[in-house]
Image (cartoon, rainbow, N blue to C red):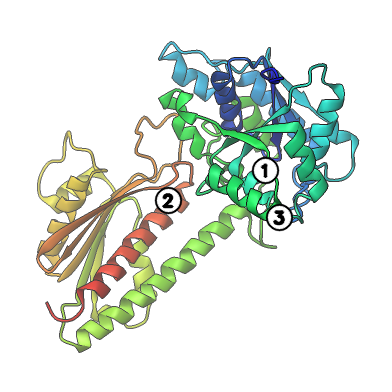
Amino acid sequence: MTPEAPRTVYLPLTGNPVGFHHLLLAECALRQQASLERVVFLLSNGQHPDPTKRQQILEKQLRLQILHHALQDWGTPATSYPARVLGRQSESLKLSVQNAEISTIEFEHNRPFRLAEHVQEIRAHQLEPEPVLLLVGADLVERMANPEIFSDEDLQVITEEARLLAVRRGAVDLQQALENLKQVRGLAPASEQLDLQLLPPALHPLLDLSSTLIRRAVQAGHSLTRFLPDAAGKLVAERQFYRREGTDLFLNEWEFNCRQLEKQLERCAVEVKQILDARAEGGAPHLLALVETSTGGRIASALTTVSGVSQHFLGSNVAYSHEEKERLLGRSTRGESSVTPKMAEALVKAVRSQTGAQWALAETGMAGPSSPERRSRKNGQCHLALSMNGKIHLRSIQINPFFSRKEHQLTFALEGLSWLRDCLLEAGGPG
């Protein structure tokens, strides 16, 4: 007998904290499965069942308070960013406090509570025999191949008593993860992929969000309005959650990530200087100039920390304002967007002409931070132009729009300097 279509989907939440991206997945599940009548959030007690993850996260009652606020605000146009966006398009959200519940069964246990235990608990109280529908990330399926994370007994329970509705996570492909799981463990739960195209296009950027990025936004002091509903965001800000929590004794997560980017940028600057040294010794063009906008001079700063770079590096112009861009270009830029390949090309031509550099790099981008008050949709976008051997080369990049301003600046700078390094290497000797 074919089992009946499930009426409930269960979403395990170890996310710390819950943000728009979690609620958006529940919203998508309701749109994809016509039979669904409710979403149950399986709220973690704060002790992660995966031994490779941090065991203790935000205290359970605070997690409950944040999730409660998030659900209350989710479909309210006055307090929820997604609802305000869709309000202009006359499209309503399906997830609401009427069809959403929060399970706190884990709170009864002062230990990590495994997913298989949730499945057994749900089946014990189900009136219908259908399998338990779990909404998970494809990365969880990937981790099921590890017997230290999912025991043979737990994998057997999930395979026999559950069905997965999985969303792609990063580079993890669901079908590949299932095939690998079947090959390694001999078992794989029935699964299908969540179709994210069922979501309104205006909400798709929120899929780039993660709990890690929310914590880093808090640590950077940025507004949380586009990250999670207002009441939840105010609670996080007022209680100063996540300010000092991180991977290093003295650095929070945001500080640590910025420092890692800075180190990569510094290493790249050393490599660029070494290549320019070799070019100069071989009689190849080696004089360099820059023009930067959204990076605020971070490329130049990295280069000028390297001893001896002055024999190659002529200087940098930080054309941050429209007025400074106009001064550099020698013309009006009224009506032009500053975040385009065309602007990057104009800037690199100007700086090369004015400095006489043999190599010139221009950067123009939008560093944010992400905020509903910023009407531009170009947050996290950067355009680069490189003048070499009398030719202009262009490159555009788009990184996660929810990075902080400093993370965007450092990433743009690293992308630009890395591209310059690679082009110098490819250019070879004199020419």
Mark-to-mark CA distance, 3 and 1: 13 Å
Residue 165's disc is none
Label 1: element kind: loop
Label 2: element kind: helix
351 or 133: nearer the viewer: 133
Tag in front: 1 or 2: 1
Instruction: Tell me if residue 323 comes above or below residue 376 in the rendering.
Output: below
Looking at the image, which residue is at 41% across and 26% down?
201
Q: Which residue is mark 3?
A: 146
381 or 319: nearer the viewer: 381
Q: Which residue is mark 2?
A: 408
Query: Which quarter of the image is occupied by the C terminus?
Result: bottom left
Residue 94 point in image, percent of width and height: 57, 15
| Contact, mark 2 vs mark 3 (Cβ under 8 Å) | no
Residue 37 point in image, percent of width and height: 67, 14
Q: Is residue 61 left or right of residue 3?
A: right
* Dot 1 amino acid type: Ala
Residue 296 point in image, percent of width and height: 35, 55
For disc 3, the neighbor class at 10 Å (few under 14, some 14 to 19, many from 20) is: some
Farthest residue, direction front: 1
Q: Earlier in the sequence, mark 2 or mark 3?
A: 3
Looking at the image, which residue is at 79% across and 27% down?
103
Q: Is residue 320 left or right of residue 10?
A: left
Q: Which residue is mark 1?
A: 188
Tag in front: 2 or 3: 3
Residue 80 point in image, percent of width and height: 55, 22
Q: Earlier in the sequence, mark 3 or mark 1?
A: 3
Mark-to-mark CA distance, 2 and 3: 35 Å
